């Protein structure tokens, strides 16, 4: 699987704990992957084919992007396109810098192809990230593909003041993302998931809308849903957010539910608090994608994320209603070549099903 697998897979799965492996990956890519030579080398190994799709007024070379949580501080943005992604999402970013939860806080269950994390939005804060991104643009190192920012609530801010916290972060990062994901569904910040409904959700969206109106630029806002919410609560959240002008849905965040462990490693991993991502999340993610597509009537794009690790799982997400896709865990377990492999498989599926474009397949199973 080439140099990328040595960067990601070898340290991640054999030698060190998950968080250290993650730091090594980002450190390597923020240096090597940001150079012309590094990008050329990565691109020569991992380049994905074209499978264009339009969403949020932008053209994506194919549907697959990097999910939030990997490049938390927006340190390796140029690397992701060189590794075959058509877009990426940095963050989650909070208004204030925060260290996150105590370590250890990231765990693997290799046989399940699952990760557990209780990171807690560890990030340098919106102002520091903004400085980095200003420097990146000044150095002509801004990627030539769509970039999303994931925004979360600062841990020290109560839900009563969450609206101004989100909108302040949005204001700071406004010029440094093409779209914004409002993360009200991470299980790793106490009380955060209460923001998915009722007055809390309304106040967050209203406050963010005010920033957008003041900026005079219609950048898309997306609501990230929890897979652990009841279907009726998901419906309520979607209806309320659409009434307040939400532009898209991300389905889904990580889950606090656990599969039955099959060995000692998974038993230890699953005994920890935090959100699970990877293959065990796939079936619930598909249910939420379908639910979201039906609830929205296909009127706004849905981003499918959770357990996407093959062209088959990616195709199921698209036919369930996802216009765009994201992955994270699959890169850890399969190596970066999983990106081009999935896109090639999707291209083959489009051809086999006699569609003229991938867009025609979105929500096809509901027809």
Image (spheres, rainbow, N blue to C red):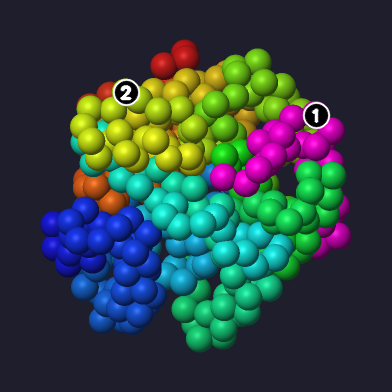
Observer-nearest of 22 and 190? 190
Residue 172 placement, left or right of 47: right
Secondary element at image label 1: helix
Q: In the figure, residue 86 lies in which quadrant?
A: bottom left
Q: Is residue 291 visible?
A: yes
Residue 214 placement, left or right of 310: right
Observer-nearest of 5 and 116? 116
**Which residue occupies 73% across, 56% down?**
156
Position of 108 relative to 130 (above/below)? above
Q: Are marks 2 and 1 in contact (CB under 8 Å)?
A: no
Magenta stretch contains residue 14: no
**Which residue occupies 77% across, 36% down?**
201
Report x, y in % for residue 50.
32, 51
**Which residue occupies 44% across, 52% down?**
105
Report x, y in % for residue 41.
21, 73
- Numbered circle sitting on residue 260: 2
Most extreme residue toward the left is 1
Secondary element at image label 2: loop
Report x, y in % for residue 141.
47, 78
Residue under pointer 1: 198
**Which residue occupies 37% across, 59% down?**
19
Q: In the figure, residue 192 lies in which quadrant?
A: top right
Magenta stretch contains residue 212: yes
The N terminus - image quarter: bottom left
Specify the segment rendered in magenta: 188-217
Position of 331 relative to 79 (above/below)? above
């Amino acid at each position: 699987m080439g140099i990328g697998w040595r960067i990601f897979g070898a340290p991640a799965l054999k030698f060190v704990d998950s968080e250290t492996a993650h730091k090594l990956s980002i450190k390597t890519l923020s240096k090597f992957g940001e150079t012309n030579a590094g990008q050329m080398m990565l691109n020569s190994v991992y380049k994905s084919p074209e499978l264009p799709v339009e969403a949020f007024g932008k053209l994506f070379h194919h549907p697959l992007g990097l999910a939030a949580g990997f490049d938390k501080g927006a340190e390796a943005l140029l690397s992701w396109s060189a590794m075959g992604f058509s877009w990426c999402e940095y963050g989650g970013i909070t208004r204030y810098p925060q260290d996150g939860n105590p370590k250890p806080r990231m765990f693997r269950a290799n046989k399940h192809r699952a990760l557990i994390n209780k990171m807690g939005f560890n990030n340098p804060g919106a102002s520091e990230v903004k400085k980095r991104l200003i420097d990146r643009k000044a150095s002509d190192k801004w990627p030539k593909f769509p970039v999303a920012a994931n925004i979360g609530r600062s841990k020290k801010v109560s839900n009563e003041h969450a609206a101004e916290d989100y909108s302040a972060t949005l204001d700071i990062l406004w010029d440094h993302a093409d779209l914004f994901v409002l993360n009200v569904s991470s299980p790793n910040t106490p009380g955060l998931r209460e923001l998915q409904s009722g007055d809390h959700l309304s106040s967050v969206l209203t406050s963010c809308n005010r920033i957008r109106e003041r900026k005079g630029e219609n950048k898309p806002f997306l609501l990230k849903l929890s897979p652990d919410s009841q279907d009726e609560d998901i419906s309520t959240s979607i209806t309320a957010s659409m009434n307040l002008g939400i532009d898209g849905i991300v389905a889904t965040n990580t889950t606090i539910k656990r599969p039955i462990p099959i060995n000692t490693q998974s038993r230890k991993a699953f005994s920890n608090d935090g959100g699970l991502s990877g293959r065990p999340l796939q079936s619930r993610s598909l249910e939420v994608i379908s639910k979201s597509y039906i609830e929205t009537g296909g009127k706004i794009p849905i981003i499918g994320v959770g357990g996407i690790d093959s062209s088959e799982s990616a195709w199921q997400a698209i036919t369930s209603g996802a216009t765009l896709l994201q992955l994270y865990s699959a890169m850890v377990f399969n190596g970066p070549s999983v990106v081009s492999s999935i896109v090639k498989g999707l291209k083959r599926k489009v051809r086999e099903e006699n569609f003229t474009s991938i867009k025609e397949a979105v929500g096809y199973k509901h027809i």
